[in-house]
Amino acid sequence: MLKADLHTHTYFSPDSLTSPEKYVQTCLERSINCVAVTDHGSISGALAVEKLASFRVIIGEEVESSEGEIIGLFLQEEVPAGLSAEETVQRIKEQGGLVCIPHPFDRFRGEHLAEAAVMRVLPQVDVIEALNSRTTLRRDNEHAARFAKEHGLAMSAGSDAHSWRELGRACVEMPEFEGPREFLEALKQGQIMGRLSNPLVHFRSRWAWLRRRFRWRPTE
């Protein structure tokens, strides 16, 4: 079985601190053997981790559409920010990727995809993130899980790690797979496990952003 953390960041995200080397080292120490690296607006971190890792790495990106964030999984190229939700989804699908809606009902996260947009693109959505460790209120994750069940969608879990300390806080224990279609089937058989992070982890993201703002390269 795989222990899969399906929403993570490296310092290729402007608000993250984790180098690809530290990322891989931490995953090995914590027996995480499948990850989706989903940096903001970039697949460079995912490609860097893939080169170093002995475990399965899904190339992903957390895309800032004009209506909120959408994750693309199994990507070949980056999807630009600022497109409509529909066009963002189309760009992901055109390259054979899967569409995941992260933290869809997190009331404290302004960048989540607007509910009206979720409903418009719902026929093209493959996965709903049912456990995000950085979601402040447990009931917002529970809302996402109920929504996924109501619409017959696969459910994922991710730490949303922006520092190496957070990696693995939310995972899916799932069977092995090959490619996007098998991934979806394996995910539907998986078991979500994990816990919420202390809300203070968001200060790490702010610190990382400030360091980048002043051209300081993260070193963790």
Image: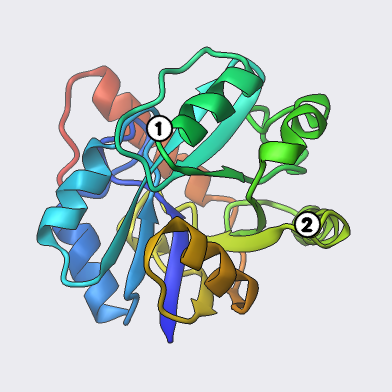
Q: Nearer the viewer, residue 198 or 26?
A: 26
Find residue 177 and report its horizontal and vertical position in percent: 41, 73
Left or right of 197 in this view: 204: left
Q: Amino acid at mark 1?
A: His
Where is residue 147 drawn, in percent x and y? Answer: 84, 54
Examine the image and state in which quarter residue 23 appears: bottom left
For mark 2, give the secondary structure: helix
Query: In the displayed image of the protein, which residue is found farthest to the bottom?
Result: 1
Q: Which mark is residue 148?
A: 2
Residue appearing at x 83%, y 54% in the figure: 151
Q: Which label's residue is closer to the chain start, 1 or 2?
A: 1
Task: For mark 1, give the secondary structure.
Answer: loop
Residue 80 on image: x %, y % = 41, 18
Q: Where 70 falls versus 28 (above or below)?
A: above
Q: Quadrant of the N terminus?
A: bottom left
Residue 6, given in percent of the width and then of the height, sits at: 47, 59
Q: Whole-Å distance between the Cαs marked 1 and 2?
A: 24 Å
Res. 108 visible in picture: no
The nearer-to-camera label among 1 and 2 is 2
Query: Tag 2: residue type?
Result: Ala
Quadrant position of residue 207: top left
Locate residue 155 relative to residue 175 in the image: left or right: right
Instruction: Identify the residue shown where x is 37% and y is 62%.
Output: 35
- Disc number at residue 40? 1
Instruction: State how many labels appear.
Output: 2
**Between residues 98 and 171, which one lies in front from this camera angle?**
98
Taking the spot 39% from the left edge, 60% from the top edge, the residue there is 179
